[in-house]
């Protein structure tokens, strides 16, 4: 999968996320899953991840894209600015 250190970092605090990453590894769903994790979909009530976990998620996403050679599936994004209208 990815560097074991990144996965260990995630599993230490969020084992359910680590499990999903393992299940989705090698599929196009992994990138969108990580993007969903990194976005606030709770109207500002999401606390966010610690820096180390967020870095590990981005590392895993990057390594997945490099290993599959597939760009992220962005078909669901119709208007980037509308998605971030709360900023």
Image (cartoon, helix red, strand yellow):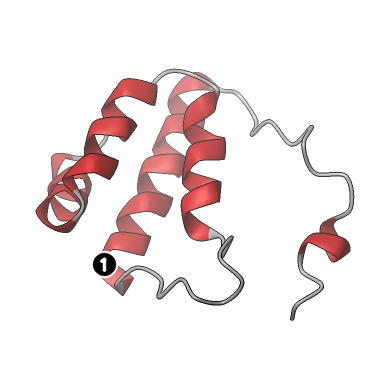
Q: Using the rendered view, name the quadrant where residue 15 is placed.
A: top left
Horizontally, residue 14 falls left or right of residue 67, namely: left
Image point (50%, 58%), residue name: 38
Q: Does residue 77 appear in this view?
A: yes
Q: Quadrant of the N terminus?
A: top left
Q: Residue 34 versus residue 4: which sits nearer the camera? A: 34
Horizontally, residue 12 falls left or right of residue 44, namely: left
Image point (47%, 45%), residue name: 34
| Residue 5 % position (x, y) | 14, 48
Q: Residues within 10 Å of mark 1 (few under 14, many from 20)?
A: few
Residue linked to disc 1: 52
Image point (88%, 45%), residue name: 78
| Residue 46 % position (x, y) | 46, 71
Q: Does residue 1 appear in this view?
A: no
Q: Residue 7 versus residue 46: which sits nearer the camera? A: 46
In the image, residue 29 sits, relative to residue 34, either above or below, namely above
Determine whether the residue tagged by mark 1 lies in a helix, strand or loop.
Answer: helix
């Amino acid at each position: 999968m990815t560097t074991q250190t990144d996965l260990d970092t995630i599993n230490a605090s969020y084992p359910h996320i680590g499990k999903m990453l393992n299940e989705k590894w090698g599929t196009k769903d992994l990138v969108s899953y990580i993007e969903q994790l990194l976005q606030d979909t709770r109207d500002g009530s999401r606390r966010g991840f610690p820096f180390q976990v967020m870095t590990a998620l981005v590392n895993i996403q990057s390594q997945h894209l490099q290993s599959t050679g597939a760009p992220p599936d962005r078909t669901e994004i119709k208007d980037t600015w509308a998605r971030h209208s709360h900023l």
